[in-house]
Image (cartoon, rainbow, N blue to C red):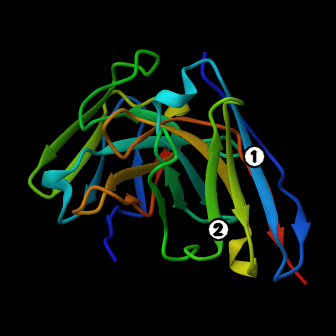
Amino acid sequence: EVQLVESGGVVLQPGGSLRLSCAATGFTFDDYTMHWVRQAPGKGLEWVSQISWDGGRRFYADSVRGRFTISRDNSENSLFLQMNSLKTEDTALYYCGKGDSSSSGIVSWGQGTPVTVST
Amino acid sequence: SYELTQPPSVSVSPGQTARITCSGDALPKQYVYWYQQKPGQAPVVVIYKDTERPSEIPERFSGSRTGTTVTVTISGVQAEDEADYYCQSADISGTYPVFGGGTKLTVL
């Protein structure tokens, strides 16, 4: 059974930094693209970033490019999101997702970790 | 930036058929996924690669496409199907995933 468990969400002030983690079990982690998706309170889903199986290709939404960095450690079956220069509009529940083979979809989701950026 | 358009809400009575649409110019060239999200829960994929259904999803869920519009159909809607539904695909390059704005399905 695929399991994705996010951690690292906190309350912090604008301009701060944070690193989210996602621990993956139940599948061959280094076979899959991984994603981060967020959901602001009461809003829809917003794709944030993705990383290829080997970490060689990384893509970001315009809203986070230059501030967020996605990475992975295949030896530890873990996915990360380094978030810098945080803004109030980054407040959201952040989900880790397992990508579908050869396509853009996300076939398994974690339960999310909350990030609140507030003064 | 590329957008996928969904109706904000759809309402049906139990036992009826619900159809939720999603429109986007690049849809003929990219796979579409549909996610169900119930309050306080993570999204769950109900349709992947346009028409495929995960084994744990009831047969009453199906996906289809016509040109630049894709549809998830729920036949014989049940109360437990009440949720937000999101379509997701990629931009024309196939690189960047994009979500529709979501449709709230209400079972009357």
Q: Are marks 2 and 1 on the same chain?
A: yes
Residue B5 higher or lower than B67, as above or below: below
Residue A12 higher or lower than A6, as above or below: below
Residue at horizontal 35 percent and vertical 62 percent from the top? B7
What number is the disc on residue B107? none
Q: Which residue is mark 1?
A: A21
Mark 2 or mark 1: which comes first in sequence? 1
Q: Chain of mark 1?
A: A
Q: Chain of mark 2?
A: A
Image quadrant in which you'd find residue B57: top left
Specify whether residue B17 is in view.
no
Residue at horizontal 24 percent and vertical 38 percent from the top? B50
Percent of width and height locating residue B42: 63, 41
Label 1: element kind = strand
Residue A27 appears left or right of A87: left
Residue B35 appears left or right of B3: right
Q: Which residue is mark 2?
A: A68
Within-10-Å neighbours for mark 1: few <14, some 14–19, many 20+: many
Cα gap from disc 2 to disc 1, whole angstroms: 13 Å
Residue A14 appears left or right of B5: right
Classify the position of the N terminus of chain B by image quarter: bottom left
Within-10-Å neighbours for mark 2: few <14, some 14–19, many 20+: many
Label 2: element kind = strand
Residue B16 higher or lower than B25, as above or below: above
